[in-house]
Amino acid sequence: MSDLGRKLADALPDAKRAWSDERVQRVEGDMLRRHTRRRVKRAALGALVTLVVVAAGSMLWLRRPQMLTLADGSSIALQDRKSVARVLANTAERTVVELVSGGALFDVTHVEGRLFRVEAGRVAVEVLGTRFVVERGASAVKVRVERGRVRVLGAGPAHILAAGETLELPIGSASSVPSVPVPVDAPATVRQPAAPADAPTESPAAPVPVPVAAPLPVTVDPLAPDEVVAPKAVRHTAPPTPPTWRAPAEQGDFDRAYRELSRSGAKSVRDVPNELLLAADVTRLSHHPLEAVPLLERVVRDHPKDPRAPLAAFTLGRALLDELGRPQQAADAFARARALAPTGPLAADALGREVEAWSRAGDTSRARARAEEYLRAYPKGARLTSVRRFGGLE
Amino acid sequence: MVAPDQEAVGPLTLEAAFRRYVRYVAAIALKIFGRDDDVDDVVQDVFLAAHKGLSGLRDDGAVKHWLGTVTVRVASRRLRMRRLRSFFGLEESRSEEIAAPGMSPEQRTLLVTVYALLDKLPVADRLAWTLRHVDGMDLATVAQYCGCSLATAKRRIAAAARALDEALADE
């Protein structure tokens, strides 16, 4: 590793810290959705054949005990030879399976906007896709939801847990002692009972019964179809010290940082450039660019000699132009960035973007003048093409 | 005691592979691109491309090598596409976006400057140099990940180093 390489490595964010459990979960979810969409597309012909077979009345393609995996990764595992199921519909919006007889275990992949429904006579079970973990300790049961929502029944009122939330209930206590939501980490052991012979189940499991040593069992249900209660936050019995916005921001969790920042208010941002820039990053990267403007303006106005001021001005220009549609103010900001550091690393880009900003503001003469200046100063600049285009020099 | 690289991992599903190795892949991608906001997409592309090849791998070292190779391939494709788009004026320079909260201004300046220079190098040279000098990989691993011979890897690294030295000497 060279000296330069070492400096770069030191400057870059640490991947282990930047990839919190929440980020891992979010990106994993996005990836799995893309994966599912690809598989659905590839299996579209297979699904069509299935529907044709069903429509033709030859119907019952699942007679023997077997596992069927649908194109989206959902699986249906028949319990025994007497169990029969048939797929009535399998489209991008809904999958409907009729359990004709016997039982089956349904492991449902979450597909955005797709309803998975199992019909057995007049009973129907609808899920969007869930995955959760139940751990039983010596004195408590912990439930952690990785995907979807579940209802947890123990002492006191039912708890609705959403993905990423954890609840711990003491087995023998007369009242529940909820814990704080914790990030999802490596899955622990999951116990799933076999599907009962005479009732349909929904994936991933029917309620997990806990052998009751004390009088208060804990049960976990995937959310029933008529239970449209919005997931509520798990209550804290002993509120922990609330995290400030800085810690999640430094970990790259900008959505959480923004929530904390909103809660703390503007006074929680000290008037030092580093903190103003960090708070501006939080608002921008959580999709609240308008709130970044006063923070960045404070750096430029109150700390013009700070080495970070040109960066603040440039970032302000970008927010005004790209996210807020204020090209004239953006042009001024880019000009300011250049004025603060005429030979700095951002000077060329700032001039290039100023050309674009004037053009978008409708001031073609200024755009042209700046474009000509760019071509003189940076004849091999990275923005030559766009500068010529926006400056009217093509 | 089993050495870490030879640790048996068993057949991996896409989800299990992702959770176990995402930070490893993300670290390589971050050093190649120099900006964190590219990494999410790159990581997804890598695992989606690599997962079919994972099923036959049984030890930790082999999985990492496979993922590393795919990461470099995905990164190469993105960098070439970006260069093509830039050539046609469809992609703007984003060097100023290299930043992370908490980074000192000196570090930001260094990253902006050097990655702007790396953007101008041939993609193959850039990748080899970054893996060797920023990620600290040994030459054999660099050659494997880049899909080239050891001699070619050395040549690319040297070419990139010369170009960077000349450019930085002018700054």
Image: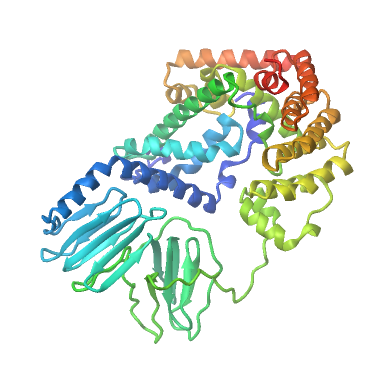
Q: Residue at x 27, y 60 (%)?
A: A96
Q: Percent x, y for residue A199?
A: 23, 73
The vertical placement of B44 against A394, above or below, is below
The image quadrant of residue B6 is top left
Seen from the viewer's position, the closer of residues A240 and A198 is A198
The number of discs equals 0
The image quadrant of residue A341 is top right
**Left or right: A301, with A393 as reference point:** right
Seen from the viewer's position, the closer of residues A226 and A9 is A226
The vertical placement of A163 against A56, above or below, is below
Q: Percent x, y for residue B23?
A: 50, 42
The image quadrant of residue A181 is bottom right
**Left or right: B79, with A110 as reference point:** right
Q: Percent x, y for residue A71?
A: 28, 48
Q: Specify whether residue B135 is in view.
A: no
Q: Percent x, y for residue B150?
A: 45, 16
Instruction: Pick the quarter of the image with the N terminus of chain B.
Output: top left
**Left or right: B113, with A174 as reference point:** right
**Left or right: A114, with A356 as reference point:** left
Q: Specify whether residue B86 is in view.
A: yes
Instruction: Pick the quarter of the image with the C terminus of chain B.
Output: top right
The vertical placement of A10 against B114, above or below, is below
The image's colour scheme reads rainbow
